Image (spheres, rainbow, N blue to C red):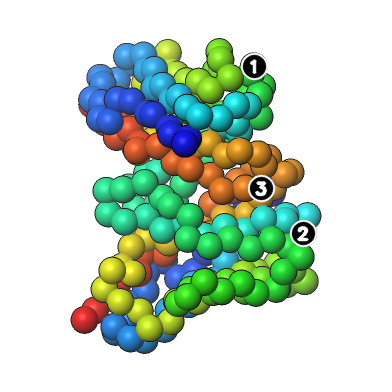
Amino acid sequence: SQTIHQWPATLVQPVGSPLSLECTVEGTSNPNLYWYRQAAGRGLQLLFYSVGIGQISSEVPQNLSASRPQDRQFILSSKKLLLSDSGFYLCAWSVQSETEAFFGQGTRLTVV
Amino acid sequence: GENVEQHPSTLSVQEGDSAVIKCTYSDSASNYFPWYKQELGKRPQLIIDIRSNVGEKKDQRIAVTLNKTAKHFSLHITETQPEDSAVYFCAASFNTDKLIFGTGTRLQVFP
């Protein structure tokens, strides 16, 4: 069966520090991969999505970036965190477009 | 632009009553419309979805309706129970690959 792993579960980082959140999927190949951010009391904001290795589409031009170095690995990064980067980050995958998306457990990031 | 609007933001109902959540989307080419439930502290999970070639879909106490002409779709929960309390998100596909979510509805079911 397919599983998605996202880590770390919680993270407290100072302003200006770098960020690296990792997401991996097991049990499938060539999945669509997504990064969403959920601010407190708000909806799920699409940050990046990828339909294949090296193919990254950015939805929000910020100080965040994403990479897909391997077929089932999706990484969210930042060189310098801002206070506004705090939130709940969710990775998700789907077998193909326009099918059910499965979410990871999420990473709660607090920038202090 | 690509947008999904969701109303209401909060909804309180008495146990046994029905709950309705409505969403509108901006792109008439969207073909896929899922609904997710997120319980407190947990990840969102799919509860039902509908595609553009279908007008209505039911699964026990939940149903979704789609009006492609008006570009809106709705979630209906009948005979609500306290365990239905959660945040519900609608979503729509854009350019096939993107899944854009609404802002969520916090449903509270009072016993």
The amino acid type of the residue labelled 1 equals Gly
> Residue at the spot x=74%, y=43% of the render?
B95
Q: Could you say whether the residue bearing mark 3 is in a helix, strand or loop?
A: loop
Kindly check if marks 3 and 1 are in contact, taking CB atoms under 8 A apart as contact: no
Please tell me the numbered disc located at residue B28: 2
Can residue A66 be seen from the camera position used here? no
Residue B15, position in %: x, y? 29, 83
Which one is closest to the eye, mark 3 or mark 1? 3
Which one is closest to the eye, mark 1 or mark 2? 1
Q: Earlier in the sequence, mark 3 or mark 1?
A: 1
Residue A28 is left or right of residue B40, and the answer is: right
The amino acid type of the residue labelled 3 equals Glu
Chain for numbered disc 1: A
Q: Nearer the viewer, residue A112 or B66?
A: B66
- Which residue corresponds to mark 3? A98
> Residue at the spot x=64%, y=18% of the render?
A53
Q: Could you say whether the residue bearing mark 2 is in a helix, strand or loop?
A: loop
- Which residue corresponds to mark 1? A54
